[in-house]
Image: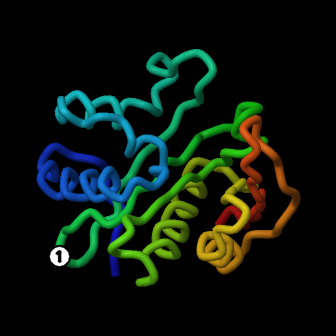
């Protein structure tokens, strides 16, 4: 079973392989934090690990936590960004949890593992109503969200025309 870990400089080589695969794929990178240039890796990891601090949050943003998903061989295969609260943009089309798996590791159950473990993190934050979104047409992500208890609420059309499906996952608080 893969596990979520806090970003660390010890994982630089594994992370850079993960990052380069995303870049080479030409796909939109999800979650957005993976698209940030990690050239200054120490600063990148520090920024990720301090993003939950209110005093570090830029205007228009919310506190968040990022984790990397490591497989059994300590390869970074995915990442998740958990927003501790929602602003208007996140309520419309971003949600509390954004996650992604690199193309070469898809269809192996990693997305379900990321989301299930991310929901444990939202439990610890006291978030009982968790919004998770995916692009319309992303059947794999939609199935993952539904499999973790997601209930479809509505779709939202972003300014550039992309349609996002919105799902709520209700947590018991235990």
Is residue 128 depicted above or below 101 in this figure? above
Residue 126: x %, y % from top left: 64, 49
Q: How is the image coloured?
A: rainbow
Q: Quadrant of the N terminus?
A: bottom left
* Viewer-closest of 37 and 78: 37
Name the residue rendered at 66%, 75% in the picture. Answer: 139
Classify residue 70 as left or right of residue 137: left
Residue 132: x %, y % from top left: 68, 57
Indicate the quadrant where residue 88 lies.
Answer: top right
Residue ID for mark 1: 73
Indicate the quadrant where residue 168 lies.
Answer: bottom right
Classify residue 141 as left or right of residue 29: right
Name the residue rendered at 42%, 76% in the picture. Answer: 106
* Residue at the far right in the pictured view: 154
Q: Quadrant of the C terminus?
A: bottom right
Secondary element at tag 1:
loop
């Amino acid at each position: 079973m893969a596990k979520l870990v806090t970003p660390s400089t010890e994982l630089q080589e594994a992370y850079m392989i993960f990052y380069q695969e995303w870049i080479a794929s030409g796909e939109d990178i999800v979650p957005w934090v993976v698209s940030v240039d990690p050239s200054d890796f120490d600063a990148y990891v520090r920024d990720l690990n301090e993003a939950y601090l209110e005093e570090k949050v830029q205007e228009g943003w919310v506190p968040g936590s990022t984790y990397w998903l490591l497989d059994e061989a300590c390869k970074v295969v995915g990442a998740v960004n958990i927003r501790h609260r929602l602003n208007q943009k996140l309520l419309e089309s971003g949600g509390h949890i954004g996650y992604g798996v690199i193309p070469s590791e898809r269809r192996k159950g990693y997305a379900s593992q990321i989301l299930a473990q991310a929901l444990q993190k939202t439990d610890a934050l006291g978030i009982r109503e968790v919004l998770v979104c995916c692009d319309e047409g992303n059947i794999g992500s939609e199935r993952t969200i539904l499999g973790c208890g997601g209930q479809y609420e509505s779709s939202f059309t972003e300014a550039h025309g992309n349609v996002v499906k919105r799902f709520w996952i209700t947590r018991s608080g235990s």
